[in-house]
Amino acid sequence: MVLRNRSRFRAPFHEHKKHFGYRFQEGEPLNPSGSFRGYKGAIAAYRNEFRYSLSFDVAAYFNSIYHHDLVSWLSRAEASERDYQSFGQFLREINSGRSVDCLPQGIYPTKMIGNDFLRFIEQFHGLRSNAVVRFMDDFVLFSDSRRDLRHDFITIQRLLGEKGLSLNPNKTSDGVRENVELEDAIEDVRIQLLQRRRVVVTDYDGVPDEEVEVEQDLSEEEMDFLRGLLQQDDIEEEDAELVLALMAEHAEEAIDRLADIARRFPHLFKNIHSFCLEAGDEEAVAEFVLELLRDNDAMIYEFQLFWLTHILEDRLLNTTSAAEIIDRLNNHPHATSISRAKLLEIPDLRYGLVELRDTHLGAGQSDWLSWSSAVGHRGLNMIDRRHRLGYFAKASNYNKLVFDIVSKG
Protein backbone atom coordinates (compact mmCIF):
# COMPACT_ATOMS: atom_id res chain seq x y z
CA MET A 1 0.00 0.00 0.00
CA VAL A 2 2.80 2.42 0.88
CA LEU A 3 4.70 1.62 -2.31
CA ARG A 4 1.56 2.03 -4.40
CA ASN A 5 1.03 5.49 -2.87
CA ARG A 6 4.67 6.54 -2.93
CA SER A 7 3.82 9.75 -4.79
CA ARG A 8 1.80 10.85 -1.74
CA PHE A 9 4.94 11.04 0.41
CA ARG A 10 5.97 14.44 -0.84
CA ALA A 11 9.04 16.58 -0.23
CA PRO A 12 8.61 19.61 2.08
CA PHE A 13 6.94 22.66 0.52
CA HIS A 14 8.78 25.37 2.46
CA GLU A 15 12.53 25.92 2.30
CA HIS A 16 12.88 26.80 6.00
CA LYS A 17 10.03 24.73 7.46
CA LYS A 18 10.71 21.17 6.48
CA HIS A 19 11.07 17.58 7.57
CA PHE A 20 13.77 14.98 6.96
CA GLY A 21 13.71 11.23 7.25
CA TYR A 22 11.67 8.45 5.78
CA ARG A 23 10.02 9.07 2.40
CA PHE A 24 10.40 8.32 -1.29
CA GLN A 25 12.48 10.33 -3.73
CA GLU A 26 12.20 9.62 -7.45
CA GLY A 27 10.29 6.46 -6.61
CA GLU A 28 12.97 5.05 -4.27
CA PRO A 29 13.09 5.11 -0.44
CA LEU A 30 15.59 7.59 0.95
CA ASN A 31 18.58 6.33 2.91
CA PRO A 32 17.69 7.34 6.50
CA SER A 33 21.34 7.87 7.47
CA GLY A 34 21.85 10.35 4.64
CA SER A 35 18.61 12.09 5.51
CA PHE A 36 19.66 12.30 9.15
CA ARG A 37 22.93 13.94 8.13
CA GLY A 38 20.87 16.48 6.19
CA TYR A 39 18.78 17.10 9.30
CA LYS A 40 21.85 17.64 11.50
CA GLY A 41 23.42 19.84 8.84
CA ALA A 42 20.29 22.02 8.73
CA ILE A 43 20.38 22.35 12.52
CA ALA A 44 24.03 23.44 12.43
CA ALA A 45 23.32 26.00 9.70
CA TYR A 46 20.30 27.50 11.44
CA ARG A 47 22.14 27.71 14.77
CA ASN A 48 24.70 29.89 13.06
CA GLU A 49 21.94 32.05 11.57
CA PHE A 50 19.53 32.49 14.50
CA ARG A 51 20.19 33.29 18.14
CA TYR A 52 17.67 30.98 19.85
CA SER A 53 16.53 27.41 19.35
CA LEU A 54 14.05 25.07 21.00
CA SER A 55 14.06 21.29 20.59
CA PHE A 56 11.48 18.72 21.67
CA ASP A 57 9.88 15.47 20.60
CA VAL A 58 6.50 13.73 20.79
CA ALA A 59 6.02 11.42 23.77
CA ALA A 60 5.52 7.73 22.85
CA TYR A 61 4.66 8.82 19.34
CA PHE A 62 4.06 5.51 17.56
CA ASN A 63 2.16 4.08 20.53
CA SER A 64 -0.18 7.07 20.69
CA ILE A 65 -1.36 7.75 17.13
CA TYR A 66 -5.14 7.31 16.85
CA HIS A 67 -6.00 4.97 14.00
CA HIS A 68 -8.87 7.14 12.69
CA ASP A 69 -6.41 10.03 12.34
CA LEU A 70 -4.13 7.83 10.23
CA VAL A 71 -6.99 6.82 7.95
CA SER A 72 -8.04 10.47 7.65
CA TRP A 73 -4.45 11.43 6.79
CA LEU A 74 -4.29 8.85 4.00
CA SER A 75 -7.68 9.96 2.69
CA ARG A 76 -6.60 13.61 2.59
CA ALA A 77 -3.45 12.54 0.73
CA GLU A 78 -5.85 11.51 -2.06
CA ALA A 79 -5.23 7.78 -1.83
CA SER A 80 -7.94 5.61 -3.34
CA GLU A 81 -10.97 4.77 -1.21
CA ARG A 82 -10.01 1.11 -1.40
CA ASP A 83 -6.55 1.84 0.02
CA TYR A 84 -7.62 4.00 2.93
CA GLN A 85 -10.54 1.71 3.81
CA SER A 86 -8.23 -1.32 3.75
CA PHE A 87 -5.68 0.60 5.81
CA GLY A 88 -8.36 1.34 8.40
CA GLN A 89 -9.38 -2.32 8.54
CA PHE A 90 -5.75 -3.36 8.99
CA LEU A 91 -5.27 -0.93 11.89
CA ARG A 92 -8.51 -2.07 13.57
CA GLU A 93 -7.64 -5.73 13.37
CA ILE A 94 -3.91 -5.72 14.08
CA ASN A 95 -4.32 -4.94 17.79
CA SER A 96 -7.69 -6.49 18.65
CA GLY A 97 -9.68 -3.41 17.77
CA ARG A 98 -7.72 -0.94 19.90
CA SER A 99 -7.66 2.56 18.45
CA VAL A 100 -4.12 3.35 19.63
CA ASP A 101 -0.88 1.35 19.71
CA CYS A 102 -1.99 -0.12 16.39
CA LEU A 103 0.79 1.02 14.04
CA PRO A 104 3.57 -1.60 13.67
CA GLN A 105 6.97 -0.29 14.69
CA GLY A 106 10.44 -0.70 13.30
CA ILE A 107 9.74 -1.22 9.59
CA TYR A 108 10.43 1.34 6.88
CA PRO A 109 6.84 1.70 5.55
CA THR A 110 5.40 2.59 8.96
CA LYS A 111 8.26 5.02 9.57
CA MET A 112 7.28 6.71 6.31
CA ILE A 113 3.68 6.92 7.51
CA GLY A 114 4.70 8.29 10.91
CA ASN A 115 7.05 10.81 9.34
CA ASP A 116 4.53 12.15 6.83
CA PHE A 117 1.64 12.22 9.31
CA LEU A 118 3.29 15.04 11.30
CA ARG A 119 3.91 17.33 8.32
CA PHE A 120 0.79 19.30 9.31
CA ILE A 121 2.84 20.76 12.19
CA GLU A 122 5.57 22.52 10.21
CA GLN A 123 3.03 23.51 7.56
CA PHE A 124 0.73 25.25 10.06
CA HIS A 125 0.16 28.86 9.01
CA GLY A 126 0.37 30.27 12.53
CA LEU A 127 3.99 29.37 13.33
CA ARG A 128 6.21 32.41 13.84
CA SER A 129 9.65 30.77 14.03
CA ASN A 130 12.05 31.62 11.23
CA ALA A 131 12.90 27.96 10.69
CA VAL A 132 11.41 24.61 11.70
CA VAL A 133 13.18 21.31 11.04
CA ARG A 134 11.90 17.87 11.93
CA PHE A 135 13.22 14.31 11.76
CA MET A 136 10.32 11.92 12.41
CA ASP A 137 8.93 13.22 15.74
CA ASP A 138 11.99 15.30 16.74
CA PHE A 139 11.50 19.05 16.24
CA VAL A 140 13.90 21.99 16.41
CA LEU A 141 12.61 25.58 16.11
CA PHE A 142 14.87 28.57 15.37
CA SER A 143 14.29 32.29 15.82
CA ASP A 144 15.88 35.54 16.95
CA SER A 145 12.89 35.98 19.28
CA ARG A 146 12.32 33.84 22.36
CA ARG A 147 8.73 35.08 22.43
CA ASP A 148 8.11 33.57 18.99
CA LEU A 149 9.59 30.24 20.12
CA ARG A 150 7.33 30.17 23.19
CA HIS A 151 4.32 31.02 21.02
CA ASP A 152 5.09 28.20 18.59
CA PHE A 153 5.77 25.71 21.39
CA ILE A 154 2.31 26.36 22.84
CA THR A 155 0.75 26.24 19.37
CA ILE A 156 2.37 22.89 18.57
CA GLN A 157 1.28 21.50 21.95
CA ARG A 158 -2.30 22.44 21.07
CA LEU A 159 -2.11 20.97 17.55
CA LEU A 160 -0.73 17.69 18.86
CA GLY A 161 -3.26 17.61 21.70
CA GLU A 162 -6.09 17.75 19.18
CA LYS A 163 -4.83 14.39 17.91
CA GLY A 164 -4.27 12.85 21.33
CA LEU A 165 -0.50 13.43 21.21
CA SER A 166 1.72 15.29 23.65
CA LEU A 167 5.28 16.55 23.97
CA ASN A 168 7.92 14.77 26.03
CA PRO A 169 8.91 17.10 28.90
CA ASN A 170 12.18 15.21 29.44
CA LYS A 171 13.32 15.88 25.87
CA THR A 172 12.52 19.61 25.71
CA SER A 173 15.49 21.97 25.75
CA ASP A 174 16.36 25.44 24.54
CA GLY A 175 19.64 26.77 23.22
CA VAL A 176 21.46 30.05 22.72
CA ARG A 177 24.01 30.61 19.96
CA GLU A 178 26.89 31.20 22.41
CA ASN A 179 27.24 27.39 22.80
CA VAL A 180 27.41 26.71 19.11
CA GLU A 181 31.21 26.30 18.89
CA LEU A 182 31.29 23.51 21.48
CA GLU A 183 28.24 21.85 19.97
CA ASP A 184 29.73 22.11 16.48
CA ALA A 185 32.95 20.48 17.72
CA ILE A 186 30.92 17.60 19.13
CA GLU A 187 28.88 17.41 15.95
CA ASP A 188 32.07 17.27 13.85
CA VAL A 189 33.07 14.08 15.68
CA ARG A 190 29.59 12.64 15.18
CA ILE A 191 29.72 13.40 11.45
CA GLN A 192 33.16 11.76 11.20
CA LEU A 193 31.70 8.66 12.82
CA LEU A 194 28.66 8.67 10.56
CA GLN A 195 31.00 8.68 7.58
CA ARG A 196 32.91 5.73 9.03
CA ARG A 197 29.90 3.62 9.92
CA ARG A 198 29.33 0.34 8.13
CA VAL A 199 26.00 0.54 6.34
CA VAL A 200 24.16 -2.72 5.76
CA VAL A 201 20.69 -2.62 4.19
CA THR A 202 18.88 -5.93 4.80
CA ASP A 203 15.58 -7.57 4.07
CA TYR A 204 13.41 -9.20 6.75
CA ASP A 205 15.21 -12.49 6.09
CA GLY A 206 18.56 -10.91 6.93
CA VAL A 207 20.07 -11.22 3.46
CA PRO A 208 22.11 -8.08 2.73
CA ASP A 209 20.90 -6.06 -0.25
CA GLU A 210 23.73 -3.59 -0.10
CA GLU A 211 26.88 -3.46 1.98
CA VAL A 212 29.37 -0.64 2.15
CA GLU A 213 32.58 -1.21 4.07
CA VAL A 214 34.33 1.80 5.52
CA GLU A 215 37.50 2.24 7.50
CA GLN A 216 37.11 0.66 10.94
CA ASP A 217 40.09 2.03 12.89
CA LEU A 218 38.87 4.73 15.25
CA SER A 219 40.92 7.55 16.69
CA GLU A 220 41.15 7.96 20.46
CA GLU A 221 38.95 11.06 20.19
CA GLU A 222 36.28 9.07 18.37
CA MET A 223 36.47 6.21 20.87
CA ASP A 224 36.13 8.68 23.75
CA PHE A 225 33.08 10.16 22.04
CA LEU A 226 31.47 6.71 21.71
CA ARG A 227 32.27 5.89 25.33
CA GLY A 228 30.62 9.14 26.32
CA LEU A 229 27.49 8.18 24.41
CA LEU A 230 27.37 4.85 26.22
CA GLN A 231 27.45 6.60 29.58
CA GLN A 232 24.35 8.66 28.77
CA ASP A 233 21.25 7.27 30.46
CA ASP A 234 19.06 8.90 27.80
CA ILE A 235 21.13 7.95 24.75
CA GLU A 236 19.46 9.04 21.52
CA GLU A 237 18.45 6.55 18.82
CA GLU A 238 20.93 7.83 16.23
CA ASP A 239 23.75 7.66 18.79
CA ALA A 240 22.76 4.13 19.79
CA GLU A 241 22.92 3.19 16.11
CA LEU A 242 26.43 4.66 15.89
CA VAL A 243 27.55 2.62 18.89
CA LEU A 244 26.17 -0.58 17.37
CA ALA A 245 27.78 0.13 14.00
CA LEU A 246 31.24 1.06 15.25
CA MET A 247 31.89 -0.60 18.62
CA ALA A 248 31.55 -4.29 17.76
CA GLU A 249 35.34 -4.65 17.85
CA HIS A 250 35.21 -3.18 21.37
CA ALA A 251 32.09 -5.10 22.36
CA GLU A 252 33.27 -5.60 25.93
CA GLU A 253 32.77 -1.85 26.47
CA ALA A 254 29.25 -1.80 25.00
CA ILE A 255 27.71 -5.18 25.83
CA ASP A 256 26.39 -4.04 29.22
CA ARG A 257 24.23 -1.38 27.53
CA LEU A 258 22.99 -3.67 24.77
CA ALA A 259 19.85 -4.87 26.59
CA ASP A 260 18.90 -1.29 27.48
CA ILE A 261 19.34 -0.20 23.85
CA ALA A 262 17.28 -3.18 22.69
CA ARG A 263 14.42 -2.30 25.04
CA ARG A 264 14.39 1.40 24.15
CA PHE A 265 14.88 1.05 20.40
CA PRO A 266 13.31 -2.26 19.31
CA HIS A 267 13.56 -1.33 15.62
CA LEU A 268 17.38 -1.41 15.93
CA PHE A 269 17.36 -5.20 16.31
CA LYS A 270 18.86 -5.71 12.85
CA ASN A 271 21.72 -3.45 13.93
CA ILE A 272 22.00 -5.41 17.17
CA HIS A 273 22.23 -8.61 15.13
CA SER A 274 25.12 -7.14 13.10
CA PHE A 275 26.82 -6.04 16.33
CA CYS A 276 26.49 -9.55 17.80
CA LEU A 277 27.94 -11.11 14.64
CA GLU A 278 31.17 -9.18 15.13
CA ALA A 279 31.39 -9.25 18.94
CA GLY A 280 34.14 -11.56 20.15
CA ASP A 281 32.65 -12.99 23.36
CA GLU A 282 29.82 -15.38 22.47
CA GLU A 283 28.98 -16.08 26.11
CA ALA A 284 28.51 -12.35 26.74
CA VAL A 285 26.18 -12.16 23.75
CA ALA A 286 24.26 -15.15 25.14
CA GLU A 287 23.88 -13.35 28.48
CA PHE A 288 22.45 -10.33 26.67
CA VAL A 289 19.90 -12.51 24.84
CA LEU A 290 18.91 -14.27 28.06
CA GLU A 291 18.55 -10.98 29.91
CA LEU A 292 15.92 -9.92 27.40
CA LEU A 293 14.13 -13.27 27.28
CA ARG A 294 13.99 -13.56 31.08
CA ASP A 295 12.54 -10.06 31.45
CA ASN A 296 8.78 -10.54 31.62
CA ASP A 297 8.22 -6.77 31.42
CA ALA A 298 10.26 -6.26 28.24
CA MET A 299 8.23 -5.41 25.13
CA ILE A 300 9.60 -8.14 22.85
CA TYR A 301 7.44 -9.15 19.93
CA GLU A 302 7.69 -11.04 16.63
CA PHE A 303 10.23 -8.80 14.90
CA GLN A 304 12.62 -8.85 17.88
CA LEU A 305 12.17 -12.57 18.55
CA PHE A 306 12.93 -13.23 14.88
CA TRP A 307 16.26 -11.41 15.14
CA LEU A 308 17.12 -12.96 18.52
CA THR A 309 16.67 -16.34 16.84
CA HIS A 310 19.00 -15.18 14.07
CA ILE A 311 21.59 -14.32 16.74
CA LEU A 312 21.13 -17.77 18.28
CA GLU A 313 21.68 -19.51 14.94
CA ASP A 314 24.65 -17.38 13.90
CA ARG A 315 26.56 -17.17 17.20
CA LEU A 316 25.12 -19.03 20.17
CA LEU A 317 24.50 -22.70 19.32
CA ASN A 318 27.80 -23.72 20.94
CA THR A 319 27.39 -21.64 24.10
CA THR A 320 26.42 -23.02 27.50
CA SER A 321 23.11 -21.12 27.34
CA ALA A 322 21.93 -22.45 23.97
CA ALA A 323 19.34 -24.89 25.39
CA GLU A 324 17.74 -22.27 27.64
CA ILE A 325 17.65 -19.70 24.84
CA ILE A 326 15.91 -22.20 22.54
CA ASP A 327 13.35 -23.04 25.21
CA ARG A 328 12.61 -19.40 25.98
CA LEU A 329 12.31 -18.44 22.30
CA ASN A 330 9.90 -21.30 21.64
CA ASN A 331 7.76 -20.65 24.72
CA HIS A 332 7.96 -16.87 24.90
CA PRO A 333 4.51 -15.34 25.62
CA HIS A 334 4.80 -13.18 22.49
CA ALA A 335 6.16 -15.89 20.19
CA THR A 336 4.27 -16.26 16.91
CA SER A 337 4.23 -18.82 14.13
CA ILE A 338 6.77 -16.65 12.26
CA SER A 339 9.25 -16.39 15.14
CA ARG A 340 8.86 -20.10 15.96
CA ALA A 341 9.26 -20.97 12.28
CA LYS A 342 12.65 -19.27 12.26
CA LEU A 343 13.66 -21.40 15.25
CA LEU A 344 12.45 -24.62 13.63
CA GLU A 345 14.44 -23.88 10.45
CA ILE A 346 17.76 -24.12 12.34
CA PRO A 347 19.28 -27.41 11.10
CA ASP A 348 20.95 -28.30 14.40
CA LEU A 349 20.49 -31.83 15.78
CA ARG A 350 21.03 -30.94 19.45
CA TYR A 351 18.97 -29.47 22.30
CA GLY A 352 15.78 -31.37 21.38
CA LEU A 353 15.33 -29.47 18.11
CA VAL A 354 14.85 -32.71 16.13
CA GLU A 355 12.07 -33.81 18.48
CA LEU A 356 10.49 -30.36 18.43
CA ARG A 357 10.38 -30.44 14.63
CA ASP A 358 8.96 -33.98 14.65
CA THR A 359 6.04 -32.76 16.77
CA HIS A 360 4.95 -30.38 14.02
CA LEU A 361 5.71 -32.78 11.17
CA GLY A 362 3.52 -35.47 12.73
CA ALA A 363 0.53 -33.20 13.24
CA GLY A 364 -0.66 -33.56 9.66
CA GLN A 365 -0.72 -29.79 9.15
CA SER A 366 0.20 -27.68 6.14
CA ASP A 367 1.43 -24.46 7.72
CA TRP A 368 4.53 -22.40 8.49
CA LEU A 369 5.52 -24.53 11.48
CA SER A 370 5.42 -27.80 9.56
CA TRP A 371 7.18 -26.36 6.49
CA SER A 372 9.91 -24.83 8.64
CA SER A 373 10.32 -28.09 10.54
CA ALA A 374 10.83 -29.90 7.24
CA VAL A 375 13.47 -27.36 6.22
CA GLY A 376 15.16 -27.71 9.62
CA HIS A 377 15.51 -31.47 9.08
CA ARG A 378 17.95 -30.80 6.24
CA GLY A 379 20.68 -31.44 8.82
CA LEU A 380 19.71 -35.13 9.02
CA ASN A 381 21.19 -37.77 6.76
CA MET A 382 19.19 -38.56 3.62
CA ILE A 383 17.59 -41.82 4.82
CA ASP A 384 16.54 -40.45 8.21
CA ARG A 385 15.28 -37.24 6.61
CA ARG A 386 13.04 -38.99 4.08
CA HIS A 387 11.70 -41.32 6.77
CA ARG A 388 10.73 -38.49 9.13
CA LEU A 389 9.17 -36.40 6.34
CA GLY A 390 7.13 -39.19 4.74
CA TYR A 391 3.91 -38.58 6.70
CA PHE A 392 4.30 -34.81 6.40
CA ALA A 393 4.47 -35.04 2.59
CA LYS A 394 1.00 -36.65 2.38
CA ALA A 395 -0.86 -33.77 4.07
CA SER A 396 -1.02 -31.42 1.05
CA ASN A 397 0.44 -30.71 -2.35
CA TYR A 398 2.47 -27.87 -0.84
CA ASN A 399 3.91 -30.25 1.77
CA LYS A 400 4.84 -32.62 -1.04
CA LEU A 401 6.63 -29.77 -2.85
CA VAL A 402 8.61 -28.91 0.30
CA PHE A 403 9.40 -32.61 0.81
CA ASP A 404 10.72 -32.93 -2.75
CA ILE A 405 12.96 -29.88 -2.34
CA VAL A 406 14.35 -30.86 1.07
CA SER A 407 14.89 -34.48 0.04
CA LYS A 408 17.18 -33.48 -2.82
CA GLY A 409 19.89 -32.06 -0.58
Image (cartoon, rainbow, N blue to C red):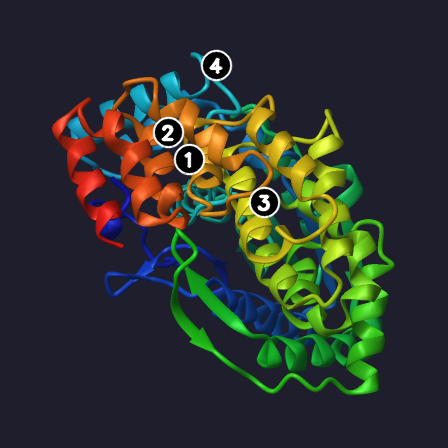
Q: Nearer the viewer, residue 267 or 159?
A: 267
Q: Residues within 10 Å of mark 3 (few under 14, many from 20)?
A: many
Question: Which mark is on residue 98?
Answer: 4
CA gap, disc 2 to disc 3? 18 Å
For residue 151, side relative to residue 205 (left or right): right
N-terminal of the pair, mark 4 or mark 2, is 4
N-terminal of the pair, mark 1 or mark 2, is 1
Task: Give the amino acid type for the residue marked by disc 3 in the picture.
Answer: Leu
Q: Marks 4 and 2: CB-CB under 8 Å?
A: no
Would residue 134 be visible to someone looking at this image?
Answer: yes
Task: Give the amino acid type for the residue marked by disc 1 in the picture.
Answer: Ala
Question: Which mark is on residue 308?
Answer: 3
Name the outermost residue toward the front: 383
Q: Marks 1 and 2: CB-CB under 8 Å?
A: yes
User: Percent x, y for residue 153?
Assistant: 67, 42
N-terminal of the pair, mark 3 or mark 1, is 3
CA gap, disc 1 to disc 4? 27 Å
Question: Which mark is on residue 369?
Answer: 2
Image quarter where the N terminus lies is top left
Q: Marks 4 and 3: CB-CB under 8 Å?
A: no
CA gap, disc 3 to disc 1? 13 Å
Task: Give the amino acid type for the residue marked by disc 4 in the picture.
Answer: Arg
Q: Residues within 10 Å of mark 4 (few under 14, many from 20)?
A: few
For residue 399, side relative to residue 113 (left or right): left
Would residue 235 be visible to someone looking at this image?
Answer: no
Question: Which mark is on residue 341?
Answer: 1
N-terminal of the pair, mark 1 or mark 4, is 4
N-terminal of the pair, mark 2 or mark 3, is 3
